[in-house]
Amino acid sequence: AIINLYGSTEIILNGSGNYGIWAGKNGSITANDLKIISNKDDSYGVVSNNNNIIYGLLDTNKNLQESNGIILNGNYNEIIMNGENSKAIYADSQYGVVKSGEGGMGYIDIIGDIVAEDGGTINLDITRSKQNWLQGDIIAFGTQSSKNASVNLTTNAALAYQGDALAANGGVVDVKLGNRSSWAGRADDYQDATNSEWLKNHTDNLDTKFSGRVTGNGTVKIDMGTESTWNVTGQSWVTGLKGNNSYIILDNDENGNGYALHLEKLPGLILLQ
């Protein structure tokens, strides 16, 4: 099934456990200038996954094309998920794809997590030269050993980002910030999970934001662009970090102890404070 939403689309979610836009295994949805607002818990703004709907004698699992997922276009995309345990953008399984159109998409104003799991893919290229906002975590989590997940976010203009960048079990988070962006949060690629002894001692005791146990490391790459600032709000591990005249501020915990930032690679000029 193919749905094209022309013009502007505004969706207000009034209940808990609601979905704004959802594409299943055999669905494809294209949206322009999208606005979704929810104030209730356990809701989703944009979802692409392996599920389908059965109405009476019509089983949408049968005899339909495979999904192209959800394509976001237009000049702006606003997704405001104010409820607890809600996600702004979510993709899982090999059929779960959320992406921008061929020419990219307009600026974003997002409250809520951006999450890819179990083979899901989220690729967002924000091309407009206008300030962007994101308040929520970016998470990539492979929930089976044979399946990864990835979130790729690129902003042409500055992004005001408040949230964590987290990846494990083969998941990949790749964020490219526009010049003069600001980020407050922590990053973690769970690189210690490459150590079998560490896994033995920690995998069942970790308190994480993932939907399952950490059994392997992920990849977190951050390109800060030029003259951007990252306020590190927790112990952080990054697979790759780039920047040009950018600043990293190491914050303190409640006891005044400074957080550490662990880097595998550090090309470019970045100043630590």
Image (cartoon, rainbow, N blue to C red):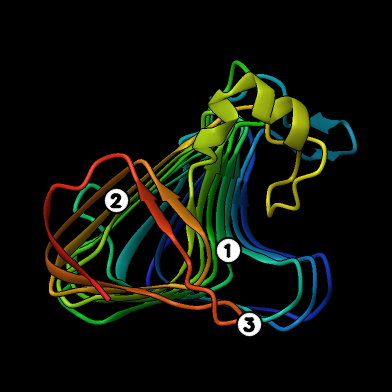
Query: Is residue 94 shown to the viewer in this render?
Result: no
Mark 2 vs mark 3: give the one in front. 3
Q: From the viewer's side, name the closer residue of 95 and 86.
A: 86
The vertical placement of 162 against 236, above or below, is: below
Who's the residue at 18% across and 73% down the image?
157
Residue 72 marker: none
Mark 2 lies on a secondary structure that is: loop
Task: Tell me whether the residue at label 2 lies in contact with that at label 3, contact meaning CB atoms closer than 8 angstroms.
Answer: no
Going by the numbered disc 3, the residue's amino acid type is Glu
Going by the numbered disc 1, the residue's amino acid type is Asp
Q: Which residue is mark 2?
A: 101
Q: Earlier in the sequence, mark 3 or mark 1?
A: 1
- Gap in angstroms between the C-alphas marked 1 and 2: 21 Å
Who's the residue at 14% across and 71% down the image?
179
Task: Tell me whether the residue at label 1 lies in contact with that at label 2, contact meaning CB atoms closer than 8 angstroms.
Answer: no
Q: Which residue is mark 3?
A: 254
Mark 1 lies on a secondary structure that is: strand
Q: Which residue is mark 1?
A: 113
At label 2, counting other C-alpha atoms closer than 10 Å, the crowd grade (few under 14, some 14-19, many 20 or more) is some
The vertical placement of 269 against 266, above or below, is: below
Going by the numbered disc 2, the residue's amino acid type is Gly
Q: Quadrant of residue 105?
A: bottom left
Who's the residue at 68% across and 54% down the image?
209
Whole-percent x, y for residue 42 in the image: 79, 66
Q: Earlier in the sequence, mark 2 or mark 3?
A: 2
- Gap in angstroms between the C-alphas marked 2 and 3: 44 Å
- Quadrant of the drawing holding the N terminus: top right
Mark 3 lies on a secondary structure that is: loop
Mark 3 vs mark 1: give the one in front. 3
